[in-house]
Amino acid sequence: MSPASNFVLGDARAYARDDGTPGWEALEAVVGGLEGGQALALASGMAAIAAVFDQVAVGSLIVIPDDCYQGVTGLARAGEQRGRWRVRTLPATDTQAWVAACREADLLWLESPSNPLLVVADLDVICAAPRKPGATVAVDNTFATPLNQQPLGLGADVVVHSATKSLGGHSDLLAGLVVVRDDARLAALRHVRELTGATPGTLEVFLALRGLRTLALRLERSQQSAQVLAERLSVHPAVTGVRYPGLSGHPTHAAARRQLAGFGMVISFDVRGTAAAADAVCAGVRLIRHATSLGAVESTMERRAAVPGQEHLPPTLLRLSVGIESVDDLWRDLDAALQQSQAVAR
C-alpha cells in the first residue's frame, strides 16, 4: 500500500498529492477495468462528484434528475446561488425531455437506479442522443455497481462511484471514484484532486480493495434476497407500495431488464399510516440496522424524508439496503416490526 506522503526525489514520484501512490493506482486499475475506462480515486463520493462539477464553465446549464442524491442537489443549488451555473431538474422517466436537453445542456447528470425511488433511466437512449458540442453526460453508478451496469459502454462520458457503499461493502471507509475514457478529461480531474487535496487515505484504499474482492459474492447474495423481500413486502398488509426494479410492476422494470445485469440490493417501500408508523418500523427492527448509507454486508434502513434536504419524499418511505444475512431472518425481523408499527398507525 506504500503509506508514504513523499518519495525520494529523482524517482517517478515526489509527493503523493501530485503523483499518486501505488495503493491509489491499484484501486484505480481495478475499478477502471470493471467500468471499461480509466479511474481516479478521491476522498469520498462527494469529492468525486465535486470534481466533475468543477469542470463546468461559468454560465453553463446543468440538468439533474428530480430524484437525486441530496448531496448532488445541494452542490448544484449552491453553485446556482453563487451565479456559477443554471440548474434544471427533469423526471428521470421523461426520456424525451432528457434527449432534448442534450442539445442545450453543458452537463447532464444522471443517477440510475435513482436514490431513493429506484427509477431506472433509459441510459442507452439518452447517452446516444446528439449533444451540444462539449457537453458531458455523467452517470452515478453507485447503486448498480459496475457488475450490473457499465454506462461508458452506453455512451456516457463520466461514471462516478461512492466506494463508501457497495464497492467497499463494510461500512468502514469513505472514498469515491471517477471513471472516464478520455485522457484529457482524466488529466483535468486529476488536477482538481491535486488542487483541492481531495485525496484518499492509505487505509481507505486498502479497505476498498479488500471489499472489491468479494463484491460479486456480496452483490449476488444481496440482490437475491432483495428480490424475495420486495415480493413479500408487496403483499404485506402494513405496506402500501414497494419500489424495486426487479418487480414486474415497477414503472421502469422494462428499462431495468434491458440495461441491468441484476436489480440491486436496495428496496424502498411505504409503510401504511403516518411518519410515526414508519419510524416505529425503524425502531422495531433488531437484525436490520437503523442507519444511513447502503451497500454493506449488514442490512440498513432509514426513513429518507427525515433526512435534511429529502423532506419532499413520501413521509412514510423507508429505504432498505439488503445485506448478506439470511433472507428468512431478515423477513422475520421486518414482518415483526411492520406488524408492531400498525398500533402506531391506528
Image: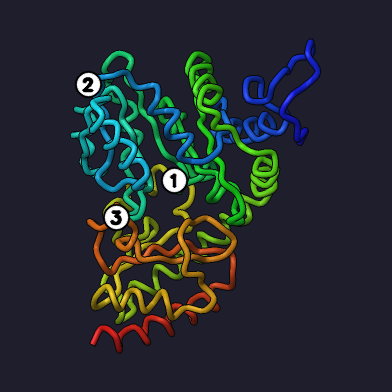
For disc 1, the marked residue is 260
Label 1, residues with CA under 10 Å away: few <14, some 14-19, many ≥20: many
Give the mark toward the camera: 2 or 1: 2
Q: CA distance from mark 2 to mark 1?
A: 27 Å
Q: Which is nearer the eye, 8 or 264?
A: 8
Residue 211, given in percent of the width and then of the height, sits at: 65, 49
Image vertical order of residue 261 relative to residue 222, above or below: above
Amino acid type shown at disc 2 = Arg
- Amino acid, disc 1: Leu
Q: Residues within 10 Å of mark 3 (few under 14, many from 20)?
A: some
Specify the label residue 21 is tagged with: none
Tag 3 secondary structure: loop
Q: Which residue is mark 2?
A: 103
* Number of marks in the rendered image: 3
Q: Report the residue marked by disc 3.
A: 310
Q: Quadrant of residue 303?
A: bottom left
| Residue lying furthest top | 10
Q: Secondary structure at mark 2?
A: loop
